[in-house]
Image (cartoon, rainbow, N blue to C red):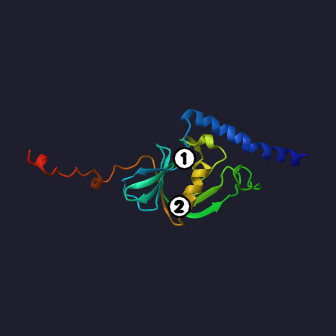
Amino acid sequence: MLYFIRQAVWTVLPAVLAAFFAVFALEAGPAQAGPEIVSFDRDYPLGAIVVVNRERRLYYVIGKGRAVRYPVAVGTPDNQWSGQSFVVAKAVNPTWTPPWNPGHTMPGGAGNPLGVRALYLGWTNYRIHGTNAPGSIGSPASHGCIRMFNADVTDLYSRVHLGAPVYVVNLLPAATQAKLAPPPAPVGKAAAL
């Protein structure tokens, strides 16, 4: 009998979790999936991942003052963190083991809380991963991991290499001074005035 109860719980749990996280998203408003190429004149190395907690955005630095920007879900106020790490491993359709039931492993795929891809961060228990609760994107909803739409994490996964630096910050630092230099002086008749 206990076996059947346990099976029923694990069959219903993903739907319950998805509904729970959808409630969080109503407060934040819907986030739109899809990477955007944006201006990014900050001093982060090429290939770096920069997560900005307050913006609920992830930037992948592509160089020449540009980055690919994605919407994300970040940790709840009690679970937000900041610091530096690196990508130590990558997984397609990662399995998930609930912390409250270490004897059970949920198979990988879109119905899994980790979604269809995961980037494991060194020195931490955190990951950048997809989700089975897309309504949570754009909100502070996780226990510290960075959640992305499955299509977005698949795109990021294809760009990121092992060892890529990861920076999690609350706010972006000011733009670099070189990018804020005044425009060149006018030439021709305008310069003589």
Left or right: 20 in relation to 178: right
Crowd class of label 2 (few under 14; some 14 to 19; many from 20; radius 10 Å): few
Q: Residue 162 lies in what quarter of the image?
A: bottom right
Query: Callout 1: few (<14), some (14-19), or many (20+) C-alpha neighbours within 10 Å?
Result: many
In percent of width and height, residue 10 lies at 78, 47
Image spot of residue 84 (x, y percent) = 47, 58
Q: For the residue labelled by badge 2, is the local secondary structure a helix, a strand or a loop?
A: helix
Q: Is residue 31 above or below residue 105?
A: above
Residue under numbered circle 1: 72
The answer to whether one can see residue 141 in this image is: yes
On the picture, is 115 further left or further right than 63?
A: right
Question: Which residue is pictured at 78% across the width and 42% down the height?
Answer: 12
User: What amino acid type is highlighted by mark number 1?
Assistant: Val
Residue 102 placed where, x, y %? Answer: 73, 55
On screen, residue 54 above or below 103? above
Say which label, 1 or 2, has the lower sequence index.
1
Q: Nearer the viewer, residue 193 or 27?
A: 193
Left or right of residue 168, residue 146 in this image = right
- Residue 46 lies, with reference to residue 142, above or below; the image says below
Q: Nearer the viewer, mark 1 or mark 2?
A: 2
Can you name the residue that lies furthest to the right here?
A: 1
**In front here: 20 or 92?**
92
Return the residue at label 2.
159
Give me the residue at 42% from left, 46% from top.
171
Confirm whether residue 127 shows in the render. no
Q: Secondary structure at mark 1?
A: loop
| Location of residue 95 with respect to 7 vertically, above or below | below
Amino acid type of the residue tagged 2 in the rendering? Arg
Measured in 3D between alpha carbons, the distance from the residue under mark 1 to the one under mark 2, in whole angstroms, is 17 Å
Residue 62 in the image: x percent, y percent?
A: 44, 59
Q: Residue at x 58, y 59 (%)?
A: 119
